[in-house]
Image (spheres, rainbow, N blue to C red):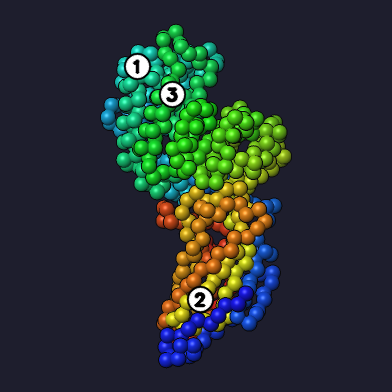
Amino acid sequence: MRIPLLKSKVLKRKFVIAFFLIISVSCVNAQEYKSGNKIKIINFEQVEIPMSDPAIVNSGTGWHLGYEWGPASNSYDVAARIIWRDLEPVRDRYDFTKIEELLKKARSRGGRALVRFRAVATSGIGVPDYMIALMPKGFWKDWLFNKKPETFAYVPDWNDPDFLERAKALLNAIGKRYNHDPRLGIIDIGMYGRWGEWHCSGIKYPTPEGTLEITEENIRAIIDMHTEAFPDKRLVMMTDNIYGLKYALQKSDKIGWRRDSYGTDWFQDPERMEIVHNRWQTAPVVAEPIGEFAPGATGFCNKMARQSKEFHVATIHGINTFKKDLKYNDEEIKAVIVAGKNSGFRFAINSISIPQRISPEGSFLLTANWKNEGVTPAYEKWQVVYQFRNQKSGKVAWEGISSINLEKLLPTAGDLKNITDTFLLPPGIEKGSYDLVVTVKDKETNYRKPLALALKGRQEDGSYNLCSVEINGGR
């Protein structure tokens, strides 16, 4: 590859170069170092992190926490399902304590929160008391199937106009406060069904109370109230309701999907997989193991690891998986860890090239060959930033933002994505030795840790030292 010398703006003659900035590059832990007439190439294949190493921890990928334990947790993110009753104890008086607790936890970990709002509790009442009086066709259901009335759950009348009006008011209130809150990440389109999962398994409609199955019109209404309340957030749609799934996905290619039967054949139901086909390229896939999962289900664990790859799972909720009192065997733990590693993105720089000579105050080219050995792109705005840092003082002498868009970097499957950026060196850069470093910075929250690449040598500030640069020239 030939890179021409850039024209000097200092001298009269158009093609005469008055000063040269001589850059000599020494690679840090690189496999090969080539020097040509006009360019130097540094290859980083030897310092890539192999899949056999411990999982890379990031926000937006891997197992996120529902519990505080787990051998496989490899995400800074947290998640919760919050019932309506806890958010509106009295009509029009909202209490966002549960949301704030979740968001504070997310920020303290350097991650974001995933959340679902739901109208049915596991047992008991999930809606505010005033709602029961407004819904004459609401009813109680033994959804734990233990025939104990004290554990029955109250099920709303999904078609009741008051249910729809008040649910919309709740979501609007939450959206008004949190739509632009950077701590809040993915939101499930919830509210309807058992656990907000968009199914009412075990209920035969019409019920003895005369309650009817939710209508298509009201399915659309519940989905619409989520998209209207959170226009700037990533949403995911549960897959149990076929009509609702199709409707949600056609509203925006930024709406992803979620299924909570991870590790089973239900997760990969062919009819649903046909609907969500390739949505992973523009929107996240969120998974969660079934509640019945417990030690002794080795095949279940192995299937999770396969499904992460096959269905391009971005992140997994560990609420039903990581409990302190459960004891998994070594094979199960290994499979669960692999499932987390197989999910989400896995970015690395394979090689970089820089020109050998650059005139002061001139532009120069920096080419990086990127790879993504994960199964998804990033679904958030991460910014790749290059810097020259003075080796003596550690101060940043120059900074440039790459044009690479990690939201568009799909799995490269052994290929490389060549990104060439044109940068301008500042006129007053001091003569001396510099480190060329790269950092993948958070552009959405401004508090998350820089994104971890699949490269060894990550420094305390989240940056990677690519090479040493000797600059002769300037002042």
Q: Residue at x 43, y 15 (%)?
A: 212
Residue 68 seen = no
Proximity of marks 3 and 2: CB atoms separated by less than 8 Å: no
The label shown at residue 135 is 1
Assign the C terminus to one quadrant of the image. bottom left
Instruction: Give the spatial CA distance, label 1 vs label 2.
Output: 68 Å
Return the x and y of residue 427 as percentages of the image width and height.
42, 81
Nearer to us in this view, 277 or 383: 277
Nearer to us in this view, 161 or 173: 161
Q: Secondary structure at mark 2?
A: strand
Q: Residue at x 40, y 24 (%)?
A: 217
Return the x and y of residue 248 as percentages of the image width and height.
46, 34
- Which amino acid, mark 3? Glu
Residue with the mark numbered 2: 364
Q: Is residue 444 left or right of residue 409?
A: left
Residue with the mark numbered 3: 216
Residue 201 seen = yes
Q: Residue at x 38, y 28 (%)?
A: 221
Q: Residues within 10 Å of mark 3 (few under 14, many from 20)?
A: few
Instruction: Give the spatial CA distance, label 3 vs label 1.
Output: 19 Å
Q: Secondary structure at mark 3?
A: helix
